[in-house]
Image (cartoon, rainbow, N blue to C red):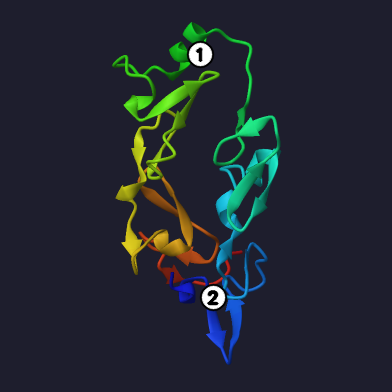
Amino acid sequence: MDNAIRGQCLCGQCTCHPPGDKRVHGKNCECDDRQCEDLNRDICGGHGFCSCGRCICSDRWFGKHCQFPRSCDMTDEQSKSLCEMADGVICSGKGSCHCGRCICSPQEWYISGEFCECDDRECDKHDGLVCTGNGVCNCGNCDCWDGWTGNACEIWVGERY
Protein backbone atom coordinates (compact mmCIF):
# COMPACT_ATOMS: atom_id res chain seq x y z
CA MET A 1 0.00 0.00 0.00
CA ASP A 2 1.22 3.50 -0.77
CA ASN A 3 1.78 5.16 2.61
CA ALA A 4 2.36 8.57 1.01
CA ILE A 5 -1.39 9.05 1.37
CA ARG A 6 -1.28 8.63 5.15
CA GLY A 7 2.06 10.33 5.64
CA GLN A 8 5.15 11.81 4.13
CA CYS A 9 8.62 10.33 4.40
CA LEU A 10 11.64 12.65 4.43
CA CYS A 11 15.17 11.41 5.09
CA GLY A 12 13.89 8.07 6.35
CA GLN A 13 11.48 9.59 8.90
CA CYS A 14 7.73 9.45 8.30
CA THR A 15 5.33 12.16 9.42
CA CYS A 16 1.78 10.85 9.47
CA HIS A 17 -1.20 12.88 8.22
CA PRO A 18 -2.95 14.70 9.58
CA PRO A 19 0.00 16.00 11.61
CA GLY A 20 -0.51 15.63 15.36
CA ASP A 21 -3.32 13.09 14.96
CA LYS A 22 -2.09 10.06 16.91
CA ARG A 23 -4.74 7.82 15.31
CA VAL A 24 -2.48 7.40 12.25
CA HIS A 25 0.80 5.85 13.36
CA GLY A 26 3.46 3.25 12.71
CA LYS A 27 6.93 3.37 11.23
CA ASN A 28 5.43 3.87 7.77
CA CYS A 29 2.05 5.34 8.85
CA GLU A 30 0.56 1.90 8.17
CA CYS A 31 -1.85 1.91 11.13
CA ASP A 32 -5.02 3.98 10.80
CA ASP A 33 -6.98 3.71 14.03
CA ARG A 34 -9.65 6.08 12.69
CA GLN A 35 -11.16 2.94 11.15
CA CYS A 36 -12.06 1.79 14.69
CA GLU A 37 -14.36 4.78 15.26
CA ASP A 38 -18.09 4.27 14.89
CA LEU A 39 -20.44 7.00 13.69
CA ASN A 40 -20.42 8.56 17.18
CA ARG A 41 -16.58 8.63 17.08
CA ASP A 42 -16.49 6.03 19.87
CA ILE A 43 -13.55 3.64 19.64
CA CYS A 44 -14.85 0.10 19.07
CA GLY A 45 -18.26 1.11 20.41
CA GLY A 46 -16.76 1.37 23.87
CA HIS A 47 -16.63 -2.44 24.02
CA GLY A 48 -13.06 -3.15 22.96
CA PHE A 49 -9.79 -1.57 21.88
CA CYS A 50 -8.19 -0.67 18.58
CA SER A 51 -5.11 -2.45 17.26
CA CYS A 52 -3.72 -0.99 14.04
CA GLY A 53 -7.12 -0.13 12.57
CA ARG A 54 -9.03 -3.24 13.75
CA CYS A 55 -11.29 -3.58 16.78
CA ILE A 56 -10.45 -6.25 19.32
CA CYS A 57 -13.76 -6.78 21.12
CA SER A 58 -14.26 -7.75 24.74
CA ASP A 59 -15.70 -11.22 25.30
CA ARG A 60 -19.37 -10.25 25.29
CA TRP A 61 -19.33 -8.15 22.08
CA PHE A 62 -18.65 -8.65 18.37
CA GLY A 63 -18.89 -6.83 15.04
CA LYS A 64 -16.63 -4.49 13.10
CA HIS A 65 -17.04 -1.84 15.82
CA CYS A 66 -17.92 -4.25 18.70
CA GLN A 67 -21.50 -3.05 18.36
CA PHE A 68 -23.31 -6.38 18.80
CA PRO A 69 -23.85 -8.20 22.10
CA ARG A 70 -23.15 -11.95 21.97
CA SER A 71 -26.55 -12.82 23.50
CA CYS A 72 -30.01 -11.31 23.56
CA ASP A 73 -33.43 -11.86 25.10
CA MET A 74 -35.65 -12.22 22.04
CA THR A 75 -37.01 -15.08 20.01
CA ASP A 76 -35.82 -15.83 16.47
CA GLU A 77 -39.15 -14.54 15.13
CA GLN A 78 -38.82 -11.26 17.03
CA SER A 79 -35.23 -10.89 15.89
CA LYS A 80 -35.97 -11.61 12.21
CA SER A 81 -38.94 -9.21 12.20
CA LEU A 82 -36.49 -6.39 12.99
CA CYS A 83 -34.13 -7.46 10.18
CA GLU A 84 -36.76 -7.88 7.49
CA MET A 85 -36.89 -5.41 4.62
CA ALA A 86 -40.19 -4.21 3.15
CA ASP A 87 -39.85 -6.85 0.42
CA GLY A 88 -39.59 -9.63 3.03
CA VAL A 89 -35.88 -10.27 2.52
CA ILE A 90 -33.78 -10.60 5.68
CA CYS A 91 -30.76 -8.26 5.71
CA SER A 92 -31.03 -7.67 1.95
CA GLY A 93 -29.92 -11.27 1.46
CA LYS A 94 -26.35 -10.13 2.18
CA GLY A 95 -26.06 -10.86 5.88
CA SER A 96 -27.54 -12.65 8.85
CA CYS A 97 -29.82 -11.48 11.63
CA HIS A 98 -28.66 -11.55 15.26
CA CYS A 99 -30.62 -9.99 18.12
CA GLY A 100 -32.70 -7.92 15.74
CA ARG A 101 -29.71 -6.46 13.89
CA CYS A 102 -28.22 -7.31 10.55
CA ILE A 103 -24.65 -8.53 10.48
CA CYS A 104 -23.29 -8.12 6.99
CA SER A 105 -21.27 -10.94 5.50
CA PRO A 106 -17.59 -10.54 6.48
CA GLN A 107 -16.57 -12.18 3.19
CA GLU A 108 -18.11 -9.23 1.38
CA TRP A 109 -16.22 -6.36 3.09
CA TYR A 110 -17.93 -3.79 0.89
CA ILE A 111 -21.47 -4.52 2.13
CA SER A 112 -22.69 -2.23 4.93
CA GLY A 113 -25.77 -0.45 6.23
CA GLU A 114 -28.43 -1.17 8.81
CA PHE A 115 -29.95 -3.82 6.53
CA CYS A 116 -26.75 -4.62 4.55
CA GLU A 117 -28.25 -2.54 1.75
CA CYS A 118 -25.17 -0.46 0.94
CA ASP A 119 -22.43 -1.39 -1.50
CA ASP A 120 -19.31 0.49 -0.47
CA ARG A 121 -17.63 -0.36 -3.78
CA GLU A 122 -19.64 2.61 -5.02
CA CYS A 123 -17.41 5.00 -3.04
CA ASP A 124 -15.07 7.03 -5.16
CA LYS A 125 -11.49 5.85 -5.39
CA HIS A 126 -8.27 7.76 -5.91
CA ASP A 127 -4.87 6.13 -6.33
CA GLY A 128 -6.68 2.77 -6.04
CA LEU A 129 -7.90 3.37 -2.48
CA VAL A 130 -11.51 3.79 -1.40
CA CYS A 131 -11.91 7.35 -0.09
CA THR A 132 -8.13 7.65 -0.68
CA GLY A 133 -7.65 6.21 2.82
CA ASN A 134 -8.60 9.64 4.18
CA GLY A 135 -12.17 8.84 5.15
CA VAL A 136 -14.71 6.07 5.43
CA CYS A 137 -17.26 4.88 2.98
CA ASN A 138 -20.78 5.46 4.28
CA CYS A 139 -23.37 3.76 2.08
CA GLY A 140 -21.61 4.56 -1.18
CA ASN A 141 -20.36 8.05 -0.24
CA CYS A 142 -17.06 9.09 1.31
CA ASP A 143 -17.16 10.74 4.74
CA CYS A 144 -13.79 12.50 4.88
CA TRP A 145 -11.61 12.85 7.97
CA ASP A 146 -10.96 16.38 9.23
CA GLY A 147 -8.72 18.28 6.84
CA TRP A 148 -9.72 16.27 3.74
CA THR A 149 -12.36 16.95 1.11
CA GLY A 150 -13.42 15.82 -2.37
CA ASN A 151 -15.58 12.97 -3.65
CA ALA A 152 -12.77 10.53 -2.76
CA CYS A 153 -11.29 12.60 0.13
CA GLU A 154 -8.32 13.22 -2.14
CA ILE A 155 -7.86 16.94 -1.43
CA TRP A 156 -5.92 18.09 1.65
CA VAL A 157 -7.32 21.44 2.82
CA GLY A 158 -5.70 21.49 6.25
CA GLU A 159 -7.26 21.42 9.66
CA ARG A 160 -10.85 22.58 9.94
CA TYR A 161 -11.79 24.81 12.82
Q: Residue at x 32, y 57 (%)?
A: 124
Above/below status of 161 relative to 14: above
Quadrant housing the N terminus: bottom left
Rendered residue at 52%/70% (across/down) = 6
Q: Which residue is mark 2?
A: 7
Sequence-first tag of 1 and 2? 2
Q: Mark 1 = which residue?
A: 79
In the depicted structure, whether residue 93 falls above or below residue 75: below
Check disc 2: other Cα within 10 Å, few if <14, some if 14-19, many if 20+: some
**Residue 129 vertical position relative to residue 82 in the rendered view, above or below:** below
Residue at the spot x=67%, y=66% of the render?
Answer: 22
Q: Amino acid at mark 2?
A: Gly
Under mark 1, the amino acid is Ser
Image quadrant in which you'd find residue 128: bottom left
Q: Is residue 108 left or right of residue 161?
A: left
Q: Quadrant of residue 65?
A: top right
